[in-house]
Image (tube, rainbow, N blue to C red):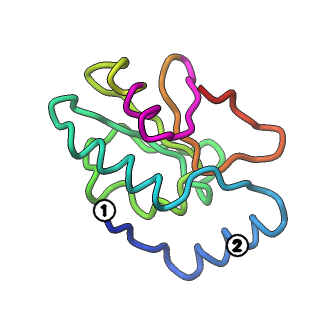
Amino acid sequence: MYQLPEPEEAAKKTIRRLLTAGSIYPVMNNTKWAELIQAMLDAPHMNPAFRLRGILAPRDHCTGWDREWHYHIHPVAEIEWLEIQAGSLDWLLSTLRKHHIPFSLEAGIPRVWGYTKPGMQPLWQ
């Protein structure tokens, strides 16, 4: 199984505070993140790309599209959501369902949720 790096202590502390306050709710865990990353690494022919929004990032910030699943996606404990594009949407949706990865479709793009917030509950696929 893919080993996931831990966030820095300051980030862990902030995330714990947000969780305790009920400001965010966890949706994914390290096992699910590792399964997702491994599935994308195992399918280079699908050319999967992602962009993400970190839970600690400014509200309007989102990364650009990236294909480096080994290093640029970490630490996953800080990901609010991750959008994925691939060579085949059918393959991508099938892969997410096969691994029981919770996601929603946002403007036709699968969005995997690391955390949700009060009043922002996505419709799960």
Q: 33 and 64: which one is in front?
A: 33
On the image, the x and y values in percent for residue 85 come to 36, 28
**In the picture shown, does residue 47 fall above or below 115?**
above
Q: Where is residue 24 shown, x and y percent of the image? A: 74, 55
Residue at the (26%, 42%) spot, across then down: 67
* Residue pictured at 55% horizontal, 82% vertical: 9
Mark 2: give few (<14), some (14-19) or many (20+) Cα within 10 Å.
Answer: few
Extreme residue in the left direction: 45
State the residue in front, 94 or 111: 94
Q: Amino acid at mark 1?
A: Tyr
Does the segment drawn in magenta span residue 62? no
Q: Is residue 111 left or right of residue 89?
A: right
Direction from residue 12 to residue 101 in the image, left or right: left
Number of numbered labels in the structure image = 2
- Across and down, in percent, residue 18 comes to 75, 65
Q: Nearer the viewer, residue 65 or 87?
A: 87
The residue that label 2 is drawn on is 16
Q: Residue at x 46, y 35 (%)?
A: 83
x and y, in percent, of residue 20 in the image? 80, 69
Q: Which mark is residue 2?
A: 1
Q: Which amino acid is tagged 2?
A: Arg
Quadrant in the picture for the C terminus? top right
Between the residue at mark 1 and the residue at mark 2, the CA separation in whole angstroms equals 24 Å
Q: Secondary structure at mark 2?
A: helix
Q: Tell me the residue at 75%/36% (across/down).
A: 121
**In the structure shown, which secondary structural element does the residue marked by tag 1 occupy?**
loop
Left or right of 39: which side holds 17? Answer: right
For the record, the magenta segment spans 94-107
Dot 1 alpha-carbon crowd within 10 angstroms: few under 14, some 14 to 19, many 20 or more:
few
